[in-house]
């Protein structure tokens, strides 16, 4: 009387399309992540905040 394991499939993650490098890190030169309020480098931790222009 072996119990059967129920496996639930998770929905596939949506992958964002690749954007050409909009900004490079001035410290290490790698591509920076573009967040809603900042640009951030995942390699060295450098962050530039997006300010309101005007």
Image: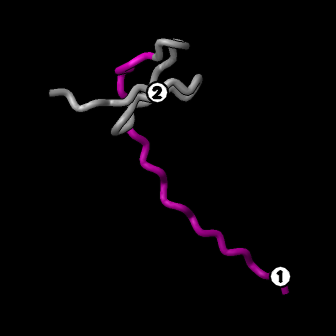
Q: Which mark is residue 13?
A: none
The span shown in magenta is 1-24
Estimate the spatial distance between the alpha carbons at disc 1 and disc 2, rounded to whole Å.
Answer: 54 Å
- 5 displayed left or right of 34: right
Residue mark closest to the camera, 1 vs 2: 2
21 w.r.t. 15: above or below: above
Residue drawn at the location 47% of the way across and 20% of the way down: 31
- 43 displayed left or right of 49: right
Residue 18 showing in the rendered view: no
Instruction: Tell me the residue that label 2 is attached to.
Output: 47
Instruction: Tell me the residue that label 1 is attached to.
Output: 2
Residue 16 included in the magenta stretch of the image? yes
Q: Please provide percent x and percent y for residue 18.
A: 39, 30
Q: Residues within 10 Å of mark 1 (few under 14, many from 20)?
A: few
Q: Residues within 10 Å of mark 2 (few under 14, many from 20)?
A: some
Residue 20 included in the magenta stretch of the image? yes
Residue 37's quadrant in the figure?
top left
Residue drawn at the location 23% of the way across and 32% of the way down: 52
Quarter in which the N terminus is drawn: bottom right
Q: Residue furthest bottom?
A: 1
Q: Secondary structure at mark 1?
A: loop
Residue 53 showing in the rendered view: yes
Q: Please provide percent x and percent y for residue 45.
A: 55, 27
Which colouring convention does the figure follow?
one colour
Q: Residue furthest right?
A: 1
């Amino acid at each position: 009387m072996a119990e059967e394991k129920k496996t639930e499939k998770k929905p596939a993650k949506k992958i964002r399309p690749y954007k050409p490098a909009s900004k490079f890190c001035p410290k290490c030169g790698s591509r920076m992540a573009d967040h809603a309020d900042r640009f951030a480098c995942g390699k060295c931790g450098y962050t530039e905040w997006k300010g309101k222009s005007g």
